[in-house]
Structure formats: structure tokens, C-alpha cells
């Protein structure tokens, strides 16, 4: 094989990064892959928009079929985002026996299995490393390097926007609103940040990770999702007093034949490797039954890192084409596991309360936990300046979630409690 | 293909781990690889020694040729360690068209290129993921996932023994000797710890990493090596006062057509992700020109983690056999780069001194640095209890190494300086 030809769908940030890499590092990439890499066509919305990289204008097209039905093109790279149009384009490309690379997590979380089946049927590759934590080679690691082990649990900081916001709140004492505004000003958050701050983006990535780690077709509806919009500076302050950092983490865990996938703001012990993942960075912590604990850390997004993931997929596909083995590495989630019933979930919990600062208040609270058989690991109390109230923070030992929630409901109704909230605490 | 047959050379800790995994997880591994995996023969020194895993005694042999010349065997796993015998066995196996997996870093650092060439010639695979940081899939990440990027620098904590010793010294205030004794008692250090504490083990791993990241046949003689035997509790104490942690790190860096590979105790800023890698854990930090910074963290050794790396290699080779593409993924270091001349090396430096505690001492020191054009980033001074001396710690800004060393020599000869030492400081 002398040459592969590429069609690019979409010319936004990541598309620009891919073209930049293919142009600037052409010699090195062609040496590595052993053949010429030709960018044949790029699908754009507007051919006349100024571009940040040099490109021959005749390569731009507004007609997707010039790529999808182009017999010259071997590999299609989908970077338009969204679900419906991307889905149709990829299906079209695969049916025309074109190999596909996508960075589209929404699409892969929703239609991944179906598209992978179609790829397999057509003996084509469908690679999507960039869809989760662009720049961190976690998908490949799950399918290749860690495939010898039985993975029991993954904890991921897989959304850079929320990690940036929580880092700012934690280190600079900003309120949620100010931290969000700062993230938006720097381009780490969208004008409409809903899908990030409500946890949906992280949930989609946990669905994709679960497919690969557990071979289970988890659905987005099975993920329990809580975002960070209710996190107050006080939560971070009191968590810190007890030795914890609050992060939005995705957890996917299998146990006794069931699976629990959730995304929620969670307390991590300060010494936990994930607790020091700052700003817009991502990291995925993997527990293997034989391997023990391992972590993958890096940038989770951005032009460069995401482009690297896309072009690494490209080099793999070129190798597969030249060996004649495309479609052979497709890995399909095909096991059945049931979502874990809430009655089986156990955890430590963090409780933060404002109470009337009167004698015996703390002992009333601790008595209530004791009656319910929940033992406490850490307690911190201090007066709230300028008033007659006190702030209290508690971390329990591991307990059944349903028992904890029942106790928490009773606690909220105690006359001395002004307000109360709780969060989960990860093990150390 | 219905079945692959394996010959195992060596039945020590890692060999036991491999047999345990192949036995316990047989069903899952066979499902994953799509064929039966048969352990045919195991080379041992003594057939009658008790074993920690169940094995049919008839599979044990003391005759290597029963494996190397056995036409039934498809894949040979070398776990005997050492260089000479392992080299002969692997060469023998490859010439008999057997695919090979090894965990032997000494061998791969010394004869890697030669053995990989032989493998390629025979269209066989030679995989060695377990040779560096067993359990962390760093070799595969360098050849696959990060291959699209131009790697500029790697910093690795790749020796668990020394990291354990330095962690103990740092957190429990132990002396080097006591920390070493503790490591030996727990099995983290050998009775003769020379190759670990003198940095040779880490240097071999940096050689292997450099082959893959830079495609350069670096030789062990080109690596500048300093071990940790001269690190005193005081170094750790004063480094900590200035906001740094001392780790034995391997650094491999390319720049302007030359390469610098070294292993030495180095100060890392406390916030650096590598600074919080504790105990016997390993981590490799990679700087890509487009990707930015990424880190791989996990256990660096041990029965389980190393066995996982070996069996992941096994699954890859089985896939290659079934696709008919063994020998096609061999990656040979073939570029020429020259070791960097010391005159080009620049760094920040940490200086620790004991001085006579008399007026003007500190200004004499700072004056000397100023005269040489070296500016200081941080200075800390405190009286040494029970005497008339003071301890001083200094971190310089980035400066040329030769200029720094000349200045340091002058400094040592100042009348007020009782003793002095220096270490390198990594950038943040």
C-alpha cells in the first residue's frame, strides 16, 4: 500500500488540530506508517470562513456525499459532534466499507454497540479513543494492556469543566457562579454548561468505559447522575477540614453479578492520587483484581490532545489496512449484568449541617447515628461567625445507603437542625 | 486456530503469578482470545520443590531444550532473569520460530535491538511489557497510543525499592540505613540492594523507554547514573522546607538533535504529580509536543502486576497468530542521536550547606552566586541545634550546569562553609 486517503467531517477545534498535525508532522507520520497519508476532502459548513491552518480551498466541501461516497477515500474521521447526523454519516461510511474514527462520545454512548456491529459486518475498523479523556489512552489500555485482568472498579475524573470549577472553588475560595464564569471566560465551559455541570457528559464517558472494561452494554438511563450545581463553598471548606477534596467523579463498579455506575460530587481523601488532579485535567483510576491500582492521567480535551488521540487511531487503522486485518479488533459489549439495587449500596457519607449552637446539640446528633447503628469516623464543629449557629461536618464509617438516608431524613427533622446535606465519600 | 501451547522458562515469583492467572482465569482468558491456552512445559531448577500453585508434575522439566526444541510449543515466556542464559534461550526460541515474551529488563536494555531484529527475521513476536514498571502499560502506550506525537521528555519513578526507601525517610524520618532495612524486611529490597540503590535498575528501564519513545539505540554507558546511598535525612528535611520532595527519577530528554538520559536523586516541586507517588509504586510522566503532559501510575513490580503484563502480551500474541501477523509489530530503534554534552545541560539546583553561624555568612554566599550570574529562587536558613553552626538550603533559578558546578566548587572552599552538597531540581 502506497497511500491512504482521508475524508474529514468537521473543521472545528479538533479538526483544525488534526489537519495541523497531519501537515506539520507529515514526514514523521508517513515514516511511522510506511505510506503516504493524503487528506482528500474536508466537510465544512462554510467554505469561505477563514481557517487557522493552511489548506487548499478545493479540498473543502459542503456536501457530505463527496466524502462518504468517494471511492478514493479509505478512512473517514467524524468530528462534527451531535448524534443524529453523525450517526447517519458513520453508518453510510461503514456501509461503503470505509474505516471510521470518531471523537463523538454522545454518539458512542448511545449507538456504540450498533455502529461497532455494523463495522464488524463490513470488516471495517471503528476507533474512538478521543471520545473519552482525549489525550489519555484509556480505551486502548482497557482493551489491550489491561485485558488480562478482571477489572473490579473504575473511578474517573472525566469532565474537565467541572474539575476546573471545583479546583477554582477549592483553591481560590470562589463561589460556584464565579468559578463557572471564570471557566467560561477561559473557554473551559460552554455558554450553556448544562451537560457538563449536570454530569451528563461524564455519565456518557462512564458508559463507554463500562462497555470496554466489563463488556456490558450499560445504558445511559442506568447511570445515577448528580451534577455540581448544588456544591457550595462551605461544602468544600468543611470537607477540607476533615481531610477530603470534593471532585465530580464517575464510578463504575461490578460486584456479585451486578453493576453500579454513577456520577456525583464525591469526597476523596486528600492523599488519593485523584484528589490532586487539578484544573481541566482528567484521570482514570482502575482497580484490577490481580493488578491492584493503576491510574492514567493527562489533559482531557483541547485541540492538541484530542488530535493526538485521533491520529493515533489513524496510525493503528493504517497498520490494520496494510496487514489486511481491519474489523478484526472490534470489541463488542455482550455480557448481561443488572444495575445494582440501591438496597445493596454501601458507602461512607459526609454530612454538613447548620445547627443552633446550644448545649447538647452535637450529642443529640451523635446519639441519633448511634441508635441507627451508624458509627462516625470524623466530626468537626465550629461556630458560624456573627450568629448563634454552628457548622458541623461528619464523616460516617461505611454503612448501607438506605439506612443512612433514613437516618438523614430523621436528622433533618430535629428541631436544632437548620439545614443539612450529604455527599458520598470514596474509600482511600 | 484451536489451541496455543506455552512453554514457561522459570517458576519463581512472576512464573507462579502467570500460572496462577492462567489456571484461575482460564475460562475468561480463553473466551477473550478465542482459543484454548495450554501450558505445555515449565523449566525449573528442581522438580521436587514445593510450589505455591497446583501444577501437574509431569509438566516440569529441568531441560530447556524440551521447551525450545518442542515443535508443539508456539509461545515461550522467559522469566529466569539474568542476561547470558536468557539471551541464549530466547535466541534459540526465535530461531525455532517461536514467539517470545520476556520480563527481563537487563537483557532488553543490553541486547534488545539484536533480539528484536532476530524476531523480525523469523516473523515472530517478541513482547516485553513486563520489563519496565510491571503493571503499568507504558511500553504499549509509547508504541501505540502516543505514537502520533513527538515525545520531548520522560520522567520516571521506575524503581520501587528506592521509592519505598525515600518515602520512609520522608514520612517517618528514618535514616537511609533504617529505611533500607525496612525495605529488606518487607521484601521490597534484595539482600544485595546494589543494583537498585545505585540506580542501575532504573537506568536499564530508561534505556528501554528511550528506545521506544525516541527510536534511538541508547546504550547503558550513555546514561549518567547516581544512586540514593548518599541521601541524608537532612537533604529531605531541607528540601521539604523549600517545598520539594526528593525522588530517584530517571529523565530522558531530546533537544536540538541530542539526547540526555540520566538517573539521579532529584527535587520535585511538592505539587508535581510524581511527588505524590509513594512507597513501592512507579509512575512515568511523558511530555508530548502536541499532547502536553500525561502520566501513567501503578504498581511497578510484584507477582500479580507483572503477571498481568505478561498475560496481556500473551493475549496480543495469540491475536497476532490468529491474524497471521506475528513479527509485524516489531519496532526497532534506528535513529542516531548524540548524548548531550554537559556544557549544554541547564537546570535548577538545590544546595545544602552547614556553615559557621556568624554575621555575614549568608550574604557571602549570596554574593558569590550573584558574581557568577546565578540568581536564587529560594533560601532557607536555621541554626543547627546544640552548636554554633547553621544549616542553609538554596534553590537556584535555571542555570548552566558547568557554571553552577564551578560556583559550587568555589563555594565549598569558602572558610565559613563546613560542608556542602547539591542535587538537581526538576521544573514544576
Image: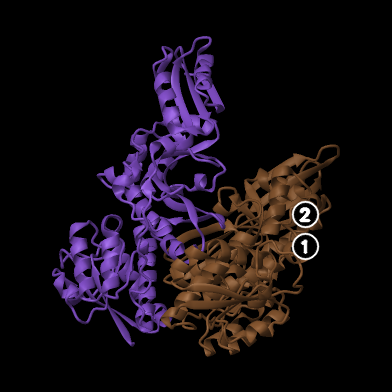
Chain colours: A purple, B brown
Residue marked by disc 2: B180
The quadrant in which residue B384 appears is top right
Q: How many marks?
A: 2
The quadrant in which residue B196 appears is bottom right
Give percent across and percent down for residue A194. Answer: 27, 43
CB atoms at circles 2 and 1 under 8 Å apart? Answer: yes
Sequence-wise first label, 2 or 1: 2
Pointer 2 local density, CA inside 10 Å: few below 14, some 14–19, many at least 20? many
Give percent across and percent down for residue B104. Answer: 65, 73
Residue B193: mark in rendering: 1
Q: Is residue B188 left or right of residue A79?
A: right
Give percent across and percent down for residue A158. Answer: 40, 51
Out of B178 and B355, give the one closest to the viewer.
B178
- In this view, B83 is above or below B302: below
Out of B354 and A25, give the one closest to the viewer.
A25
Pointer 1 local density, CA inside 10 Å: few below 14, some 14–19, many at least 20? some
Out of A89 and B15, give the one closest to the viewer.
B15
The quadrant in which residue A341 appears is top left
Residue at the far top in the pictured view: A359
Q: Is residue A303 left or right of residue B205?
A: left
Residue positioned 19% across, 81% down in the render: A71
Q: Quadrant of the N terminus of chain A?
A: bottom left
Mark 2 to mark 1 CA distance (whole Å):
9 Å
On the question of residue B393 being in view, the answer is no
Same chain shared by disc 2 and disc 1: yes
Amino acid at each position: 500500500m502506497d497511500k491512504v486517503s482521508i475524508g474529514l467531517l468537521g473543521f472545528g477545534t479538533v479538526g483544525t488540530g488534526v489537519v495541523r498535525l497531519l501537515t506539520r508532522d507529515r514526514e514523521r507520520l508517513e515514516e511511522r506508517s510506511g505510506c503516504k497519508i493524503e487528506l482528500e476532502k474536508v466537510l465544512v459548513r462554510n467554505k469561505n470562513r477563514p481557517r487557522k491552518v493552511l489548506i487548499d480551498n478545493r479540498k473543502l466541501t459542503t456536501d457530505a456525499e463527496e466524502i462518504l461516497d468517494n471511492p478514493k477515500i479509505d478512512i473517514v474521521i467524524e468530528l462534527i459532534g451531535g448524534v443524529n447526523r453523525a450517526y447517519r454519516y458513520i453508518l453510510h461510511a461503514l456501509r461503503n466499507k470505509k474505516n471510521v474514527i470518531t471523537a463523538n462520545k454522545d454518539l458512542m454512548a448511545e449507538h456504540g454497540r450498533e455502529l461497532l456491529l455494523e463495522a464488524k459486518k463490513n470488516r471495517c475498523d471503528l476507533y474512538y479513543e478521543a471520545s473519552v479523556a482525549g489525550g489519555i489512552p484509556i480505551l486502548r489500555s482497557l482493551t489491550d494492556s489491561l485485558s488480562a485482568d478482571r477489572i473490579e472498579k473504575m473511578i474517573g475524573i472525566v469532565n474537565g469543566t467541572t474539575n476546573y470549577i471545583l479546583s477554582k472553588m477549592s483553591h481560590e475560595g470562589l463561589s460556584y457562579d464565579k468559578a463557572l464564569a471564570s471557566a467560561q471566560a477561559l473557554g473551559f465551559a460552554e455558554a450553556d454548561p448544562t451537560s457538563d455541570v449536570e454530569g451528563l457528559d461524564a455519565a456518557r464517558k462512564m458508559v463507554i468505559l463500562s462497555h470496554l472494561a466489563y463488556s456490558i452494554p450499560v445504558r445511559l438511563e442506568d447511570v445515577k447522575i448528580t451534577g455540581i450545581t448544588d456544591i457550595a463553598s462551605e461544602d468544600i471548606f468543611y470537607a477540607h477540614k476533615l481531610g477530603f477534596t470534593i471532585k465530580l467523579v464517575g464510578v463504575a463498579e461490578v460486584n456479585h453479578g451486578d453493576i453500579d455506575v454513577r456520577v456525583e460530587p464525591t469526597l476523596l481523601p486528600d492523599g488519593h492520587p485523584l484528589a490532586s488532579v487539578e484544573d481541566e485535567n482528567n484521570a482514570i483510576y482502575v482497580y484490577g483484581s490481580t493488578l491492584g491500582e493503576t491510574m492514567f492521567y493527562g489533559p482531557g480535551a483541547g485541540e492538541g490532545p484530542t488530535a493526538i488521540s485521533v491520529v493515533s487511531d489513524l496510525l493503528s487503522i493504517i497498520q490494520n489496512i496494510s496487514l489486511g486485518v481491519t474489523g478484526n479488533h472490534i470489541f463488542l459489549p455482550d455480557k448481561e449484568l443488572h444495575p445494582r439495587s440501591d438496597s445493596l449500596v454501601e458507602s461512607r457519607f459526609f454530612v454538613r449541617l447548620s445547627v443552633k449552637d446550644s448545649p447538647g446539640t452535637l450529642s443529640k446528633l451523635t446519639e441519633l447515628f448511634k441508635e441507627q447503628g451508624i458509627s462516625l469516623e470524623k466530626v468537626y464543629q465550629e461556630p458560624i461567625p456573627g450568629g448563634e449557629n454552628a457548622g458541623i461536618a461528619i464523616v460516617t464509617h461505611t454503612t448501607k445507603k438506605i439506612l443512612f438516608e433514613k437516618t438523614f431524613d430523621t436528622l433533618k427533622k430535629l428541631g436544632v437542625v437548620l439545614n443539612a446535606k450529604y455527599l458520598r465519600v470514596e474509600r482511600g
